[in-house]
Amino acid sequence: MGLDPQAKLFLDLMKQQNTPALDQLSIEENRNLNKKLTTFGGQPERVNKVEDVVIPVREGQITLRLYTLLARDPFLFLFTTMAVVGF
C-alpha cells in the first residue's frame, strides 16, 4: 500500500519549499507556517462542540482538545498538545 496521493503531494510541496525542521523555527515562523498549512486542506470542517479534557498521567497531566464536528456520520477529531516544563 502506497502513500496517500494528497499526503505525498503535501510532503513534496514541503520539500520544494526547503522548509527547516519545526524545532529550528522561531515561534512566529512556526505560527506563520501553520497558517499556510491550514489552507492546504481546503475549507475547515464545521465544529459542533470543543472540549478541553485533562488526563492524569504519572508525571503530571496531558491536556487534550476534542472537536466534535457537524456531520452526518459521527466523527471525533483529537488534537493533542504537550508541553515539557522544567528543563
Image: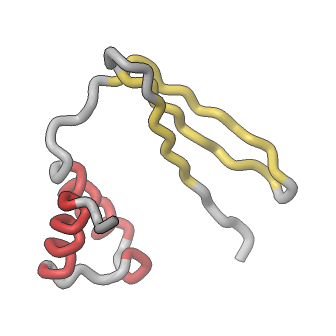
Image coordinates for residue 53, horizontal then vertical, percent: 65, 33
Q: Quadrant of residue 63?
A: top right
Nearer to us in this view, 7 or 19? 7
Quadrant (top left/top right/bottom left/bottom right) for the N terminus:
bottom left
State how many labels appear. Answer: 0
Q: Is residue 17 left or right of residue 80?
A: left
Q: Is residue 73 above or below residue 22?
A: above
Nearer to us in this view, 16 or 9? 9
Extreme right residue here? 58
Image coordinates for residue 46, horizontal then vertical, percent: 28, 24
The residue sitting at 28% across, 69% down in the picture is 29
Image coordinates for residue 7, horizontal then vertical, percent: 25, 62
Nearer to us in this view, 43 or 11? 11
Q: Is residue 53 left or right of residue 34?
A: right
Quadrant (top left/top right/bottom left/bottom right) for the C terminus:
bottom right
Q: Is residue 24 above or below residue 64?
A: below
Q: Is residue 6 left or right of residue 66?
A: left
Image coordinates for residue 28, horizontal then vertical, percent: 31, 66
The residue sitting at 23% across, 79% down in the picture is 19
Q: Is residue 9 left or right of residue 55?
A: left
Extreme front residue here? 1
